[in-house]
Amino acid sequence: ETGVTQTPRHLVMGMTNKKSLKCEQHLGHNAMYWYKQSAKKPLELMFVYNFKEQTENNSVPSRFSPECPNSSHLFLHLHTLQPEDSALYLCASSQDPADTQYFGPGTRLTVL
Amino acid sequence: EDQVTQSPEALRLQEGESSSLNCSYTVSGLRGLFWYRQDPGKGPEFLFTLYSAGEEKEKERLKATLTKKESFLHITAPKPEDSATYLCAVQAYSGAGSYQLTFGKGTKLSVIP
């Protein structure tokens, strides 16, 4: 596989469930990102990792917990979500934080 | 606070009817302006980066231009396969070696055969 991949592509969960989103990049990049895309709203940056270290947390609620075990993998752990958290969650990567970001296909999350 | 406004929100064109999409921005210390294309249910696909006023870049039927306050994405003789949402984003330095992209809401383009 090439580029940025995300699994699962679709996820339906209840408010009491715990689930994780996975992102993998095959581009040899050092920076990885999580974004949230809701209908009628711009993409919202959630977290930034550079060389496995978190460098940005844009006031994201603690029910979202990121993990970056290495420069190729990024996870978003979800627990006790709310219906308003339903959105498309996008992962992106770049060579460094100043470089062009390349996006994965996204995970469509529905919270019931 | 960095702001990006895209207009129009939606645009319907006949095949072959050229037009332009606008992205106006206010940002402290612009490093670059990015254009992406997003198809329904997919992630944004990178198109162009512009770094300085007066810069232009072209790719097939698309040409992006940049001034100090706005960018235009010109679409010449569009085809139905150009139908997508076009996103504009500005990149600025956010401190401690970090840069942030601020996105607009996008322009949804529909090209009718």
Image: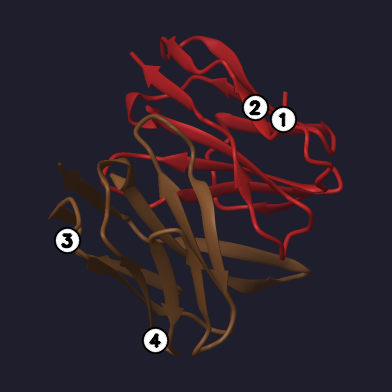
**Of the two numbered discs 3 and 1 in the rendering, the one whose residue sits closer to the viewer:** 3
The amino acid type found where label 2 is placed reads Thr
Instruction: Say which quadrant the N terminus of chain B sits in.
Output: bottom left
Q: Which residue is mark 2?
A: A5
Question: Which colour is chain B painted?
Answer: brown
| Residue at the image point whose x is 53% and y is 84% from the top | B55
Q: Which residue is mark 1?
A: A2
Is label 4 on the same chain as label 3? Answer: yes
Circles 1 and 4, Cβ within 8 Å, touching? The answer is no
Which subunit holds the residue at mark 4? Answer: B
Where is residue A79? Give x, y as percent.
Answer: 55, 19
| Residue at the image point whose x is 48% and y is 80% from the top | B27
Q: Which residue is mark 4?
A: B69
Is label 1 on the same chain as label 2? Answer: yes
Q: Which residue is mark 3?
A: B17
Which subunit holds the residue at mark 3? Answer: B
Is label 3 on the same chain as label 1? Answer: no
Distance from the alpha carbon under mark 2 to that under mark 3: 36 Å
Question: What element does badge 1 sit on?
Answer: loop
**Of the two numbered discs 1 and 2 in the rendering, the one whose residue sits closer to the viewer:** 1
**Of the two numbered discs 4 and 3 in the rendering, the one whose residue sits closer to the viewer:** 3
Where is residue B51? Give x, y as percent.
Answer: 59, 79
